[in-house]
């Protein structure tokens, strides 16, 4: 998969079973920017995902992106908000990049895969949420650079987390 978003330097490929321990560790180290999954949670979440891709850095998995198509049985408050208020979007549930791989274009390459898959499905938008409280200004800046715009806010987890709801056209 090579296009304007990806390169051979950051080969994006499907998540493999052998990647799961490392990717679960990267995910859980990123809390509270993402919700924890643990190895079992990641393994049980993958069947819901339409897209589950990883990228390597220095020969090992260093990042992942998990995304869901419309109509999934995923119970996430954020996903359900998009299903109700912005139907027909390709929802990026999480993107995590290991700290040692930050700033190398890996996140951009992963989003390239999501945009490509959304276009293949005939979906006009990619959606996601980013924490406002607890704050995640680096992720807001990253998503803004990629062309995402905030369309709303949502309090989740009983009001303990507030997220920015963001979308970006597929094309």
Image (spheres, rainbow, N blue to C red):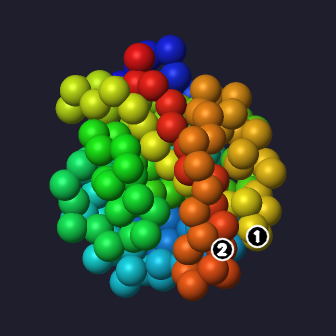
Q: How many marks?
A: 2
Residue 116 appears left or right of 110 = left
Residue at 61% x, 34% y is 149
Rendering quarter of residue 88: top left
Residue 105, compared with residue 93, is above or below; it is above
Q: Nearer the viewer, residue 127 or 46?
A: 127
Residue 62 appears anywhere in the view? no
Residue at 75% x, 67% y is 133
Tag 2 secondary structure: strand
First in sequence: mark 2 or mark 1? 1
Q: Residue 33's x, y, as percent? A: 67, 65
Q: Residue 97's x, y, as percent? A: 63, 53
Q: Which residue is mark 1?
A: 134
Residue at 78% x, 48% y is 138
Q: Which residue is mark 2?
A: 161
Figure quadrant of the N terminus: top left
């Amino acid at each position: 998969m090579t296009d304007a978003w990806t390169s051979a330097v950051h080969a994006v490929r499907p998540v493999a079973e052998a990647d799961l321990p490392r990717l679960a560790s990267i995910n859980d180290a990123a809390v509270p920017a993402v919700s924890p999954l643990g190895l079992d949670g990641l393994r049980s979440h993958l069947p819901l995902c339409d897209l589950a891709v990883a990228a390597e850095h220095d020969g090992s998995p260093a990042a992942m992106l998990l995304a869901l198509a419309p109509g999934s049985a995923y119970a996430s408050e954020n996903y359900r908000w998009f299903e109700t208020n912005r139907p027909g979007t390709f929802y990026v549930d999480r993107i995590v990049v290991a700290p040692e791989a930050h700033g190398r274009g890996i996140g951009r390459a992963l989003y390239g895969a999501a945009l490509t898959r959304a276009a293949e499905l005939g979906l006009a938008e990619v959606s996601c949420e980013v924490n406002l409280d607890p704050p995640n200004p680096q992720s807001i800046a990253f998503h803004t650079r990629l062309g995402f715009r905030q369309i709303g806010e949502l309090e989740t987890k009983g009001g303990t987390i507030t997220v920015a709801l963001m979308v970006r056209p597929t094309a």
